Image: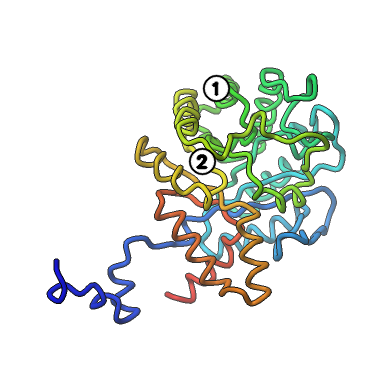
Amino acid sequence: MNFPFYRPRRLRKTETIRNMIRETTLTPNDFILPLFVTFGKNVKKAIKSMPGHYQLSVDNIVKEAKEIKKLGIPAVILFGIPEHKDEEGSTAFDPAGPVQEAIRAIKDKVPGLAVITDVCMCEYTSHGHCGIIKDKDVDNDATLELLSKEALSHVEAGADIVAPSDMMDGRVAAIRDILDDNDFSHIPIMSYSAKYASAFYGPFRDAAESTPQFGDRRSYQMDPGNTDEAIREVVLDIEEGADIVMVKPALPYLDIIRRIKTEFGYPTAAYNVSGEFSMIKAAAERGWLDGDRAMMESLTAIKRAGADLILTYFAKEAAILLQKKR
């Protein structure tokens, strides 16, 4: 394979040839779109730090879901913003809560669209942490009961997949047990297995109104310097009954995605988080880079690293761009 007999540029000459030999390709079927559902009617409240995204009431969630399905995106993941919050996040498992109502509405009005739900307490607690507080920290074992109740309420409303994101030890087993005990053994769990304590969550916390009122989440989310720990987390989640494992964030942790996919061969998701989205949007608005190209390059990198599913706020834009290229 020595020059001049082998010339790699021969296969880069035209777009047609480049497309023919491309090793990693994106389709809308790779994407899951996060949506923020809130209380009330006819609500469409712009999220300032995430251009093009909104807090939506159930009626507008249904409209969005219909558009998503037309674009070929197979699934959404729902995050709830309740009207009232308390220390234990009791609205998380309220059958009349915004997420539960949105699940029922989507399943009724948009059949065939998969509905995934985020299972965590941070959007529902008055203190913004992911569970019950004891001595200014989250009480792991006491929180498991709340997470289990939340997951069950989502599935009873019609959720297709539940996705615990809290990073409590043992939560996958607790959720698997309560689902199995209530005749929902067929419902998959997509676990946020390697969720890092990241600076890239800032815009999401604006969107979900879930900024911690004291301290931070480093006592339960992972240290960014650790890789072997991510493997241990995945092992635990698989042993406890997870059907899909996830890495969050995506772009700063491509090495983690690749290692998990290589070592386990398990269905692997990656969350292209709000900060990754908003950085590209902000730079594109200032003319510092080509937003569409940066978007597609980032999503391709996540898939190339080994992700089977990509949770991304770019899902609609990327799907539209992919349709135009057909």
Measure how far apart labels 2 and 1 are at the Cα level: 16 Å
> For residue 17, which numbered disc appears in the image?
none
Near mark 1 (Cα within 10 A), the count class, few <14, some 14-19 or many ≥20, is some
User: Where the N terminus falls, by quadrant?
Assistant: bottom left
What x and y, as percent, mark residue 35?
67, 52
The relative height of residue 175 versus residue 245 in the rendered view (above or below) is above
What x and y, as percent, mark residue 73?
53, 58
Near mark 2 (Cα within 10 A), the count class, few <14, some 14-19 or many ≥20, is many
What x and y, as percent, mark residue 274?
65, 54
Which secondary structure lies at badge 2?
strand
Q: Residue at x 54, y 70 (%)?
A: 320
The relative height of residue 286 versus residue 249 in the rendered view (above or below) is below
Seen from the viewer's position, the closer of residues 223 and 240 is: 223
| Amino acid type, label 1 | Ala
Residue 225 located left or right of residue 218:
left
User: Which one is closest to the eye, mark 2 or mark 1?
Assistant: 2
Residue 60 located left or right of residue 168:
right
Seen from the viewer's position, the closer of residues 137 and 110 is: 137
What x and y, as percent, mark residue 142?
71, 18
The relative height of residue 209 versus residue 33 in the rendered view (above or below) is above
Label 1: which residue? 173
Label 2: which residue? 246
Q: Residue at x 79, y 49 (%)?
A: 38
The relative height of residue 142 versus residue 63 in the rendered view (above or below) is above
Instruction: Tell me which numbered mark, 2 or 1, is placed earlier along the sequence.
Output: 1
What count of labels does the image hold? 2
User: Where the C terminus falls, by quadrant?
Assistant: bottom left
Residue 252 located left or right of residue 255:
right
**Is residue 173 at least partly visible in the picture?**
yes
